[in-house]
Image (spheres, rainbow, N blue to C red):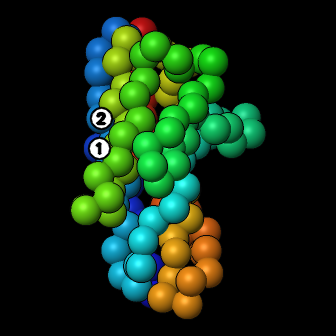
Amino acid sequence: QVHVVESGGGLVQAGGSLRVSCAASGSIFSLNHMGWYRQAPGKQRELVAAITSDGSTRYADSVKGRFTISRDNAKNTMYLQMNSLKPEDTAVYYCRSTVVGADGHDYLYWGQGTQVTVSS
């Protein structure tokens, strides 16, 4: 069984910074592709940033230059450093992890989400 848990969300003023983390635990052989998504009230879930197992990254245009995604493979943990936050960044942030099981197959897991609220 695999657990994926986000942490680090909260309330911050516009222009501030916040770092959210995503930790995977359980029956994990390795982690493959990982990503952060967000969903604001009344909107569809959208990709914020993604990172491959070898560290290649991509970002949504709306967060380029402000957010940085990273991962620590030894800790099975992914991070999202968010700087220069704007009220429109307010959303529930979800971690999406592709876990390589002991059978060599990829399995997709989502975390429960962490709320990020940016006040103006």
Closer mark to the observer between disc 1 and disc 2: 2
Left or right: 86, with 21 as reference point: right
Tell me if I can see residue 69 in this picture: yes
Residue 37 location in percent, x, y? 58, 43
Depicted 48 relative to depicted 99: above or below: above
Residue 5 location in percent, x, y? 38, 62
Depicted 4 relative to depicted 13: above or below: below
State the image quarter where residue 79 is shown. Answer: top left
How far apart in space, not on screen, are marks 1 and 2 (Cα)? 6 Å
Check whether the beta carbons of the residues at disc 1 and disc 2 lie within 8 A of each other.
Answer: yes
Mark 1 vs mark 2: which is more N-terminal?
A: 1
Q: Which mark is residue 8?
A: 1
Describe the element under mark 2 as helix, strand or loop: strand
What quarter of the picture does the N terminus occupy?
A: bottom left
Dot 2 corresponds to which residue? 19
Q: Residue at coordinates 57% horizontally, 28% vertically from top-left?
A: 59
Q: Residue at coordinates 29% horizontally, 44% vertically from top-left?
A: 8
Residue 43 location in percent, x, y? 73, 35
Left or right: 9, with 51 as reference point: left
Describe the element under mark 1 as helix, strand or loop: loop
Q: Nearer the viewer, residue 10 or 83?
A: 83
Disc 2 crowd rating (10 Å Cα; few below 14, some 14-19, many 20+) is some
Q: Residue at coordinates 51% horizontally, 61% vertically from top-left?
A: 32
| Dot 1 amino acid type | Gly
